[in-house]
Image: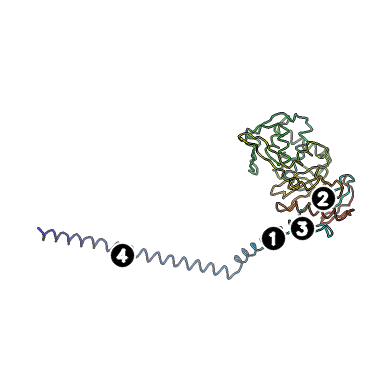
Amino acid sequence: MVKLFFRRMVLVYMAMALVASPVEVLAAHKKTTKRVVLSQKNALTKHRIASRYQSGRIGAQKVSVKLRSTRNLQSQREFMVDESYDGSGILQLASNKALIINQNTGEVIYAKNTNLPSPIASITKLMTAMVMLDAKQPLDEVIEISSEDVDYLKGTGSRLSVGSRLSRGEFLQLALMASENRAASALANNYPGGKGIFVKAMNAKALELGLGSTHFVDPTGLDSENVSTAEDLAKMVQAAFQYPEIRAATTTASREVYVEGHNYPVNFNNTNGLVREGEWEIGLSKTGFINEAGRCLVMQTIIAGEPMIIVLLDSYGKLTRIGDANRIRRWMEHNSEPKATTTGQTQEVVAGRIS
């Protein structure tokens, strides 16, 4: 019995050995094949990399772009924070379009590309406010943010959720001070006839004010088809300045508002840092930004004892328009009687009064 058992064990072992041998051979073959494939891939990759560096095109482009962007960012920061300019030299502004006008006399102090139409972003909300106020709708009437006020064009967010209820006056404040898009949209949607009639009233008001190069398609400024020129915007600022509600709203540094869904007041800040800092004497202010328009800023302010209207359009960087405003103030304060200039004007404009 023992011998028989031993023989059976030997036979089982031999059978297992015969089965395992092909498997081991196959595994070894797969490993060898894998090494060959990897070796070929590595060789091909090395060849491609070597070819690219030999041509010098791809590597040089990446390095060049990176260096350029770094230099641009560095020069932008230097331009924004430059405190060395005392106003004695030539006034150079980063904004692609700029206009400075003496509000009392209409004299053009500085002009740069003032008659070139471009998107104006949330500067639009000044016209929105004027049209709403012209309708004499009660400012204490409570209105509501609806789904129609949500921005599906640019996808911007808001702390005013659908269903939020505030007075018309509070929505006006948030639209102008904090540039709240849903607030501006709610003002238009609650206008007699709705938003479509409201936009028509905006364009009618533009014609009434003589803004021949200005056109509106929405009340928020999110649509890039809202266009104007620096010259037209100076007139629009002058018109908006006649409304005490607009002056008060645009020059408030911040405000706490109880918003639907919050158990505590939500703080909204003015989008113009110059208003928040409180070092300027500002009578009206509005900022704007979408990619197509760049950074924009319009203000009525007192500089060197004179009321000035400043329009800055299509500036790059978050702080560059503020840097431009500071350079303007230093330049005007250094020159007690600044002479009119058309620095940077692409089309000839006679210095003098813009009627």
Which residue corresponds to mark 3?
83
Mark 3 or 1: the one toward you: 3
| Label 4, label 1: how far apart the Cα atoms are | 63 Å
Sequence-wise, the earlier of marks 2 and 4 is 4
Question: Within 10 Å of the Cα at label 3, are there few (<14), some (14-19), or many (20+) other Cα atoms?
Answer: few
- Please state which amino acid type lies under the numbered disc 2: Leu
Q: Residue at x 63, y 36 (%)?
A: 264
- The C terminus lies in quadrant: top right
Q: Are marks 2 and 1 in contact (CB under 8 Å)?
A: no
Q: Residue at x 70, y 33 (%)?
A: 189
Identify residue type, mark 4.
Val
Q: Nearer the viewer, mark 4 or mark 1?
A: 1
- Which label's residue is closer to the chain start, 2 or 1? 1
Q: Quadrant of residue 151?
A: top right
Circle nearer the N terminus (3, 4):
4
Coordinates of residue 85 in the picture (x, y in percent)? 80, 59
Answer above or below: position of 275 versus 70: above
The residue that label 2 is drawn on is: 99
Query: How far separated are the C-alphas under marks 3 and 4?
Result: 78 Å
Q: Earlier in the sequence, mark 3 or mark 1?
A: 1
| Above/below status of 200 relative to 53 | above
Residue beneath disc 1? 74
Write down the quadrant of residue 160 in the picture: top right
Residue corresponding to mark 4: 25
273 vs 210, left or right, is left
Spot the residue most to the bottom.
54
Q: Is residue 15 above or below residue 148?
A: below
Discs 3/2, front: 3
Mark 3 residue type: Glu
- Identity, as a three-letter code, of the amino acid under mark 1: Gln
Q: Which tag, 4 or 1, sits closer to the chain's start? A: 4
